[in-house]
Amino acid sequence: MLFVQNSAKTAQKGAKMGKKIAETDELDHKILKFLQEDGRLTFTEIAQKLRLSESTIRKRVQSLQERGVIKKFTVEVDPAKIGLNTVAIVGIDVDPPKLLEVSQKLCEFKEIRSVATSTGDHMIMTEIWTKDGKELTKLISEKIGPIEGVKKICPAIILEKLKG
């Protein structure tokens, strides 16, 4: 899995810091698409697919990394294959003044794979991987629920992930 940062937000941030942020072009988008489909592709393989030189691809990827477009290269894991059979998206509502504090505390739990503050139905959205429903219940009731500022916890167990 490849994480790609929002280019508009990056450009705004760079402009505030006095940095000139180059926009991505069609070639950058093609390179990103190949890397998102298979992050193990070599620069040579991408170059062959695009009929360009390896050095062109290498320089483009390096530039994308330096500009923060490519944040990191990582591995996508199937949780069930490592004994984590319950995946849940959990919305959490908190007292507004505690939003950042609670969000940071949630980042400390190894079972919580992602934490995002959001608008909409819940103030914080998390993805949690546990061995089973019992372990998820224990995590929610013994670790998340007691955090100061947490008002409401709304878990939704994922039955089947179709994309992403």
Image (cartoon, helix red, strand yellow):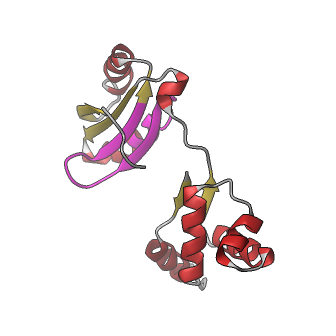
Residue 105 in the image: x percent, y percent?
45, 36
Residue 32 in the image: x percent, y percent?
57, 67
Q: Residue at x 59, y 76 (%)?
A: 28
Residue 138 in the image: x percent, y percent?
35, 16
Q: Residue at x 51, y 80 (%)?
A: 16
Magenta part of the protein: which range?
103-128
- Quadrant of the image occupied by residue 44: bottom right
User: Is residue 18 rendered to the left or right of residue 118?
Assistant: right
Above or below 101: residue 2:
below
Residue 130 in the image: x percent, y percent?
43, 23
Q: Residue at x 52, y 83 (%)?
A: 15
Q: Is residue 24 visible?
A: no
Above or below 18: residue 5:
above
Residue at the farthest right position: 55
User: Is residue 153 rendered to the left or right of residue 112?
Assistant: left
Q: Residue at x 54, y 82 (%)?
A: 26
Q: Examine the structure image and report whether residue 158 is included in the region drawn in magenta.
A: no
User: Is residue 106 rendered to the left or right of residue 19?
Assistant: left
Q: Examine the structure image and report whether residue 127 is included in the region drawn in magenta.
A: yes
Say which of 158 and 125 sits in front.
158
Above or below 142: residue 97:
below
- Quadrant of the image occupied by residue 63: bottom right
Q: Is residue 136 visible?
A: yes
Total marks shown come to 0
